[in-house]
Every structure is written in C-alpha cells, then in structure tokens.
Image (cartoon, rainbow, N blue to C red):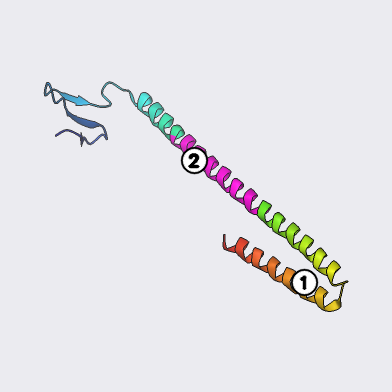
Amino acid sequence: MAGEHSHNGRAEGKNPLTGDPYSINAGMSEDQESFLRGIYVKASIMEYDRLEAERVRLNQRRLWRRNCIQIALAAASLAAGYFVLRHYAFDPGSVFTLSVILIGLGAAVEQIGIRE
C-alpha cells in the first residue's frame, strides 16, 4: 500500500504509474539521513524563533501604545488639576477632592495594566 512504513522507519510504497516499489529515502546513507534530519530540526527552530520575534515585536508595540496613553492621561489630569486649583485659589477642600480623584485614576490605570 502507498505510504506504508517498513520496520526501519522508511516510507515505502508503489509508483502509481508503473507499480514499481519505491522508498522515499532510497539510496540515502545513514549519514545523509542524519544530515537532512539536522537541517529539518534547524529549520524548525529558525521558524519558531521567527514567530517568537514577531510576537515580541507586537507585544512591544502594544506596551508602547499603552504607555503613551498613560502618559497622555497623566499630563491631562495634571493640567486639569492645575486649572481647578488655580480657579479655586488652592482651597483645602478642592485640593483634597482633586487628590482623591487623581489617586483613584492612578489606581484604575494600574488595575487595567495588571489585567492585561
């Protein structure tokens, strides 16, 4: 039958046109087979490394984007806080309220970062 394996691990079968038996590894020495197995293993490792590098690149881009958003939110919060405090002339109640809001925003950003 086509595609059968013999006891030595070589794929064997019959040529569908002529009916002659053949072996995929026919005429290859053990050294050649070992060499080709080594090449296949190295190619597999290189493909895995390439996929890992792509995954790392995508994760770095995602982290960079998230860090930029966090910096922008922090800058906007600081600017808004400055204008609120300036408007209320640094009233202790407004300072406390703004501090609590900023601490809450920081905690929310950290929780979002932890979940990802």
Residue furthest to the left: 19
Residue 32 falls inside the magenta stretch: no
Residue 34 horizontal side relative to residue 1, left or right:
right
Q: Residue at x 57, y 63 (%)?
A: 115
Residue 47 falls inside the magenta stretch: yes
At label 1, counting other C-alpha atoms closer than 10 Å, the crowd grade (few under 14, some 14-19, many 20 or more) is some
In this figure, which residue is indicated by the disc labeled 2? Answer: 51
Figure quadrant of residue 70: bottom right
Q: Residue at x 51, y 37 (%)?
A: 50
Q: Residue at x 38, y 25 (%)?
A: 31
Q: Which residues are magenta?
A: 44-67
Looking at marks 2 and 1 on the same chain, the residue that comes earlier in the sequence is marked by: 2
Label disc, if present, on residue 98 of the rendered structure: 1
What residue type is disc 1 on? Leu
x and y percent of residue 45 in the render?
Answer: 47, 37
Residue furthest to the right: 89
Considering the whole magenta stretch, tell me its main secondary structure.
helix
Q: Residue at x 46, y 33 (%)?
A: 42
| Front-most of residues 61 and 35 | 61
Figure quadrant of residue 72: bottom right
Residue 20 horizontal side relative to residue 114, left or right:
left
> Taking 54 as reference, is 19 above or below it?
above
| Front-most of residues 73 and 30 | 73
What residue type is disc 2 on? Leu
x and y percent of residue 20 in the render?
Answer: 13, 22
Residue 42 horizontal side relative to residue 86, left or right:
left
x and y percent of residue 61 in the render?
Answer: 60, 46
